[in-house]
C-alpha cells in the first residue's frame, strides 16, 4: 500500500478529538466545504462564504451552519474584508492544512507543493514535539 505524507494535529482532549473527527468525516457537507480549499498548488488561501453558497447545492442556512461548526472546531478561521461591500472569507488554519491535503488527490498535487507541505508540517510537528519532550522530561537523544 502506497502512503501519503501526513502529520495530524488533533485536540489533546479525547472527547474533543472524537467529536472533531466524527463531525468532519461524518458530514458530507463539511467534507464538500473543505474540498473547496483543494487546488493543484495545495490549499487555497481564502474562500468567500458567498462563493460557497453560490457554488454548492445546499441552502444558505446549511452552509453557514457547517461553516460555523468548522470554525468552532478550530479548522477554519473567519475574516471580513471590504471591497465594494463587506464580505466574509474563510481560511484554513495553518495547523489544519493537513486535513485539506488529506482530502486532496496526491497525484494531482504539484510536487513542489508537496515538498513545501512536508517541510511546513515537519516544522510544526517538531515544535510540538519539543514542547512534549520538555513536558514529559524525555531525553532528546532517545528520539533519534
Image (tube, rainbow, N blue to C red):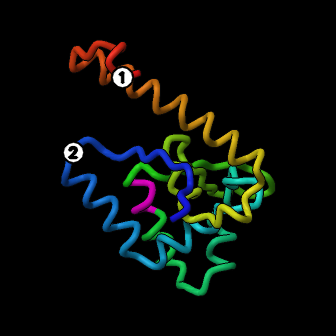
Q: Nearer the viewer, residue 5 or 127?
A: 5
Identify the mark at residue 143; answer none if there is no mark.
1
Residue, x 21% and y 45% (percent of image)? 13
Q: Earlier in the sequence, mark 2 or mark 1?
A: 2
Identify the mark at residue 64; answer none if there is no mark.
none
How many discs mark residues in the rendered view?
A: 2
Q: Residue furthest right?
A: 84
Is residue 88 placed above or below 59 in the rendered structure? above
Quarter assignment of residue 12: top left
Residue 58 sits inside the magenta stretch: no
- The local crowd at label 2, few if under 14, some if 14 to 19, many if 20 or more residues have their Cα within 10 Å, is few
Q: Position of residue 45 (x, y in %)?
A: 69, 50
Q: Position of residue 29 (x, y in %)?
A: 48, 77
Residue matched to label 2: 13
> Which range is magenta?
68-72
Q: Secondary structure at mark 2?
A: loop
Q: Secondary structure at mark 1?
A: helix
Direction from residue 61 to residue 20 in the image, left or right? left
Q: Position of residue 96 (x, y in %)?
A: 50, 48
Amino acid at each position: 500500500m502506497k502512503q501519503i505524507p501526513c502529520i495530524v494535529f488533533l485536540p489533546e482532549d479525547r472527547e474533543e478529538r472524537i467529536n472533531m473527527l466524527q463531525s468532519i468525516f461524518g458530514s458530507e457537507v463539511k467534507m464538500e466545504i473543505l474540498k473547496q480549499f483543494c487546488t493543484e498548488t495545495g490549499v487555497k488561501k481564502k474562500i468567500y462564504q458567498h462563493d460557497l453558497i453560490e457554488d454548492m447545492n445546499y441552502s444558505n442556512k446549511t452552509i453557514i451552519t457547517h461553516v460555523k461548526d468548522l470554525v468552532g472546531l478550530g479548522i477554519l478561521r473567519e475574516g471580513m474584508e471590504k471591497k465594494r461591500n463587506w464580505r466574509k472569507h474563510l481560511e484554513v488554519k495553518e495547523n489544519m492544512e493537513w486535513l485539506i491535503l488529506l482530502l486532496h488527490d496526491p497525484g494531482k498535487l504539484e510536487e513542489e507543493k508537496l515538498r513545501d507541505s512536508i517541510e511546513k508540517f515537519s516544522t510544526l510537528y517538531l515544535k510540538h514535539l519539543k514542547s512534549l519532550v520538555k513536558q514529559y522530561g524525555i531525553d532528546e537523544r532517545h528520539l533519534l
